[in-house]
Image (cartoon, rainbow, N blue to C red):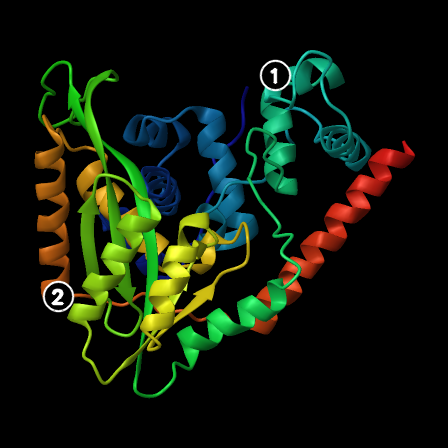
Amino acid sequence: MRRDDICIYVNAANRASLEAIAADRNSSSKAVWRARIVLATADGLGTNAIMRRTGKSKPCVWRWQERYIEEGVDGLMRDKTRPARKKPLSAHTKLAVIEKTATQKPVNATHWSARTMAKAVGLSHRSVQRIWAEAGLKPHLVRTFKLSNDPKFAEKVTDIVGLYMNPPDRALVLCIDEKSQIQALDRTQPGLPMKKGRAATMTHDYKRNGTTTLFAALDVKTGEVIGECLPRHRAKEFIRFLKKIERVVAKHLDIHAICDNYSTHKTPQVRAWLDKHPRFKLHFIPTSSSWLNLVERFFAEITDKRIRRGVFKSVEQLEAAIHDFLAKHNTAPKPFVWHTPAKKIIAKVRRGRAALTHQIKSATDH
């Protein structure tokens, strides 16, 4: 391969730019040696001398000399686009994969994996993954749901959300519930502490040392929690907890208590006690709607922060840990703020029910 040496004229502005690129430590290495090829050519060096100075091959030197002549300094800062090694998948192929994912199931599984789909359509599993990512499909994930069948769903949601967002004057709004069957679990072997490159460890098996039930009443306004651990969660224990609330809450305040539909909250004994204490007004959430009771958010927090990873050799240790968490929580409480209006919740549930009805009808027709 032979070619006569060429001469390149570099004006003062371009020379300054090229020298700056070559001297800048933040410049990419390929931008530096390209700039040096052009500067050496402008200084009158021949191809062989430039090759020795830059350590590049003859075709490489020629290529970037020609690129500078055609496109100037900007041409040295980018590579030419090259055609893909393989042709991109057609829109028809992508659509076929998406349709198969959404409407069919593999013969011996409940959902597609990238490799089973790749085998079914004759593509690589990486191609299937890219198609799914572009379409936002995640066949390996499933979300649980439950639509309430309570005939008074809209009425109850409006009532509960109204208490959250517009609480009555001279009243305290409490979210009451029980976290039942909390187990005092002791691990069969001691775990190892966390260290660099390794998470803390805990045995998968455990020893049960009894259970307790946490009765809790969350103050919607302040975030404070009235709590008590009792061995069972019958009407008797529920009334005992209501008596504790009666003692703690200032006498001049009405108490609006938000509860779920657990039968313990509706027994004749409970109703009789409530009749004798008219400042208590119970508001029941719709069935299958525990997400509407804010105290459930507190239960999630105490479970995650204090109970799940705890080691308890007795029920007494478990209850002591719970009471300690309650005391520390109440020193600096933070309320859970409800933002979603009732109308939005009701509309969303109606859309969900319409979609579910349509799905059931389609399945029946087929």
Q: Indicate which disc, 1 or 2, sits on the residue closer to the N terminus.
A: 1
The total of numbered circles placed on residues is 2
Res 27 seen here: no
Q: Position of residue 287 (x, y in %)?
A: 55, 53
> Disc 1 on helix, strand or loop?
helix
Answer left or right for 9 relative to 117.
left
Q: Position of residue 140 (x, y in %)?
A: 56, 28
Which residue is outermost to the right? 365
Q: Amino acid at mark 2?
A: Ala
Q: Which mark is residue 115?
A: 1
Location of residue 118 with respect to 160 vertically, above or below: above
Give the camera-side residue of 315 and 340. 315
Q: Position of residue 93 (x, y in %)?
A: 78, 30
* Label 1 packing within 10 angstroms: few (<14), some (14-19), many (20+): some
Marks 2 and 1: in contact by CB < 8 Å?
A: no
Q: Residue at x 36, y 45 (%)?
A: 35
Q: Residue at x 58, y 24 (%)?
A: 126
Quadrant of the image containing the N terminus: top right
Answer left or right for 149 relative to 238.
right
Q: Which mark is residue 282?
A: none
Give the camera-side residue of 268 and 155. 268
* Label 2 packing within 10 angstroms: few (<14), some (14-19), many (20+): few
Q: Which mark is residue 332?
A: 2
> Disc 2 on helix, strand or loop?
loop
Location of residue 168 with respect to 8 vertically, above or below: below
Q: CA distance from mark 1 to mark 2?
A: 51 Å
Location of residue 63 with respect to 252 vertically, above or below: above
Quadrant of the image containing the C terminus: top right
Q: Position of residue 297 (x, y in %)?
A: 34, 54
Q: Residue at x 16, y 25 (%)?
A: 197
Q: Amino acid at mark 1?
A: Arg
Res 76 seen here: yes
